[in-house]
Amino acid sequence: MFPDAPRTDELRLAIGLARVRSMMRLLEAPRDLSMTTLSTLATLERQGPRRLTELAAIEGVTQPAMTRLVSRLEHERLAERLPDPVDGRVVVVAITQHGRDELARRRAAQAKRLAELLADLSEADRQAIAAALPAIDRLTTHAFDSLTSPAPTSPAPSREGTTPTPGAPA
């Protein structure tokens, strides 16, 4: 076995969570929006307005692809571009109320189909799934936070002992 290879229980968990993700995707209807579109809307809802470059990095797509996606979201009134409150020269993308409503509608339909599947399970299985939710929430929050936090930057080189260039920022 390779030294950095995941343990068997980690592999089982990864496979199990991937199967849950696939199952939840199957429960989505209508399928008129792509997974990236829905994921982008959910990111905007969860994290607030983001720059296109940030969204592209979070969603794992190129900046041109995210630009096209955001244009479609704007056309469908699911998201909008706004001036960055910190730097008015920059644009951020924000979810609209229509986008929030659309996500809520889709989640409700998905939850209804999930409830039908859960009804076929034993009470013990339903309780075990419910008991795992807090840990899954902590895991996903940790994952989102670690993947969307700005990368640590190296400190700027020391300017001590140098003469500033006229007109250059100090």
Image: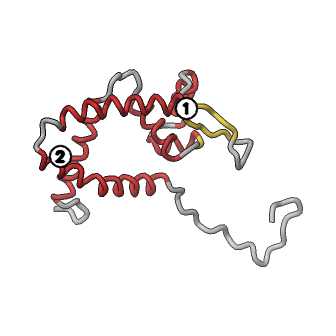
Under circle 2, the secondary element is helix
Say which amino acid is labelled 1. Answer: Gln
Say which amino acid is labelled 2. Answer: Arg
* Residue at image location 70% in from the left, 49% down from the top: 86
> Looking at the rendering, which quadrant does residue 71 occupy?
top right
Q: Measured along the vertical axis of the image, is residue 10 above or below residue 59? A: below
What sort of colour scheme is used for the picture? Answer: secondary structure
Q: Do the residues under discs 1 and 2 have CB atoms within 8 angstroms?
A: no
Q: Residue furthest right?
A: 166
Q: Measured along the vertical axis of the image, is residue 163 above or below residue 103? A: below
Q: Residue under label 2, please give it.
A: 126
Q: Residue under label 1, please give it.
A: 97
Under circle 1, the secondary element is helix
| Whole-percent x, y for residue 146 in the image | 44, 57
Query: How many numbered tags mark residues here?
Result: 2
User: Of marks 1 and 2, which one's residue comes earlier in the chain?
Assistant: 1
